[in-house]
């Protein structure tokens, strides 16, 4: 499910990047996705950008610092299409430099050979959603002696 949500987020951000408002996005493109996946993608965007439009400062690729270049040993472990996928996410503003670095580390330190797109999509989902949860680090349960106001 998380991979589908990432795919939807990419589609939505690309649409917003070219100036389409969220409410004007054609829902026909979402056939094959269930309502919870669509809702999760929209929720992620709304929480992240708090607006119906893609922020102007995020639209410009020029505002983003260039990502680091892969070391030759990293190139042996990360397929070119995987690195291209990471670059796309980075320049769309879906991941930042620290996310990208963490994803490269995952790829390098795994022992199963070259990282493919399915692996990286799983890790992207984990990094994006886990970091969002960490930023909103709110206790989800009460210990028994707290009060809610």
Image (spheres, helix red, strand yellow):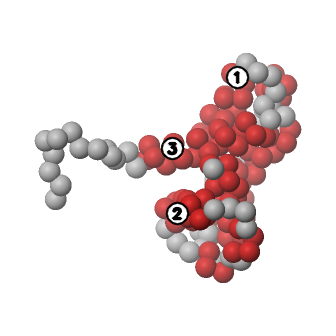
Q: Is residue 28 left or right of residue 1?
A: right
**Residue that extends furthest to the top in the rendered view of this protein:** 111
Identify the residue at image location x=67%, y=40%: 122
Q: Badge 1: few (under 14), some or many (20 or more) residues near its Cα, within 10 Å?
A: few
Any part of residue 69 in sight: yes
Label number found at residue 141: none
Q: Residue at x 51, y 42 (%)?
A: 130
Q: Quadrant of residue 118?
A: top right
Quick one: 120 or 33, which is closer to the camera?
33
Please identify the residue farthest to the bottom as the structure is shown: 24
The residue under label 3 is 131
Which residue corresponds to mark 2?
43
Q: Earlier in the sequence, mark 1 or mark 2?
A: 2
**Label 2 SS:** helix
Looking at the picture, tell me which residue is in the foreground, 131 or 40. Answer: 40
Secondary structure, mark 1, is loop
Q: Is residue 15 above or below residue 128?
A: below
């Amino acid at each position: 499910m998380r991979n589908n949500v990432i795919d939807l987020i990419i589609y939505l951000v690309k649409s917003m990047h070219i100036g389409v408002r969220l409410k004007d996005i054609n829902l026909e493109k979402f056939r094959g996705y269930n309502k919870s996946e669509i809702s999760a993608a929209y929720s992620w965007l709304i929480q992240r950008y708090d607006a119906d439009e893609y922020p102007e400062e995020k639209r410009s690729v020029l505002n983003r610092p260039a990502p680091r270049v892969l070391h030759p040993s990293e190139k042996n472990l990360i397929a070119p299409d995987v690195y291209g996928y990471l670059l796309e996410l980075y320049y769309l503003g879906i991941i930042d430099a620290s996310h990208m670095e963490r994803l490269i580390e995952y790829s390098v330190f795994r022992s199963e050979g070259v990282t493919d797109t399915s692996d990286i999509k799983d890790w992207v989902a984990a990094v994006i959603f886990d970091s969002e949860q960490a930023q909103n680090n709110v206790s989800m349960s009460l210990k028994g002696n707290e009060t809610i106001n």
